[in-house]
Amino acid sequence: MLKRCVVYFLHFKTDTDWRGGLIRKPQIQPGINVMKRKLGAHDNLKITIQQEGNKFTVKESSTFRTIEIIFMLGVNFEYSLADGTELSGTWNLEGNKLVGKFNRKDNGKELKAFREIVGDELIQTYIYEGVEAKRIFKRV
């Protein structure tokens, strides 16, 4: 079941849905177990991003969960990853890129996140402890 959405990144506007597909360079390091990597590669994640001024609503729907996250640019908020990891941090807009800086609550380490529209793709990049993982969402 596909949902209709409007995606805004400053001047970028389109009526579309994004479906997760290709995952590049999964995190292969101690602390990221094989089962979590395999589940992440097959979660069938769909993302909807809506913007109203500085307020963003992100809807994430996957095989494992469906959530709605509401945040304001530059305002600290709390979020839990699909594996239960709890984070605290902010999203900011830098050009056409959403840039997130978060700290894990369990160990205080930083997780950086980027979301950017390039052509017909939404590219999501996470950087944690020097390991970069990219996920490319296709317009549906």
Image: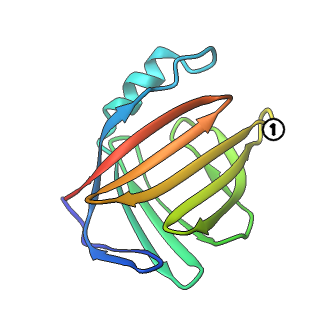
In the image, 128 versus 55, the foreground residue is 128
Colour scheme of this structure image? rainbow
- Decide if residue 100 is on the left or right side of residue 11: right
In the image, 15 versus 58, the foreground residue is 15
- The total number of labels drawn is 1
Question: Among all residues in the image, which is located at the extreme right?
Answer: 108
The residue tagged 1 is: 108
Q: Height in image: 100 above or below 131? A: below
**Rendered residue at 25%/59% (across/down):** 120
Quadrant (top left/top right/bottom left/bottom right) for the C terminus = bottom left
How far from the left and from the top, in percent, is residue 43?
34, 38
**Rendered residue at 41%/47% (across/down):** 65
**Which secondary structure, mark 1?**
loop
How far from the left and from the top, in percent, is residue 48?
37, 64
Tell me which corner region of the image, top left, top right, bottom left or bottom right, holds residue 50.
bottom left
Q: Height in image: 35 above or below 90? A: above
Q: Height in image: 4 above or below 18? A: below
- The crowd level at tag 1 (other Cα within 10 Å; few <14, some 14-19, many 20+) is few
How far from the left and from the top, in percent, is residue 20?
31, 46
In the image, 50 versus 61, the foreground residue is 50
Question: Among all residues in the image, which is located at the extreme bottom?
Answer: 53
Q: Height in image: 119 above or below 40? A: below
**Rendered residue at 25%/69% (across/down):** 16
Q: Amino acid at mark 1?
A: Gly
- Decide if residue 78 is on the left or right side of residue 134: right
Quadrant (top left/top right/bottom left/bottom right) for the N terminus = bottom left
**Rendered residue at 52%/18% (across/down):** 28
How far from the left and from the top, in percent, is residue 49?
42, 67
- Decide if residue 36 is on the left or right side of residue 24: right
In the image, 101 versus 107, the foreground residue is 101
Tell me which corner region of the image, top left, top right, bottom left or bottom right, holds residue 130.
top right
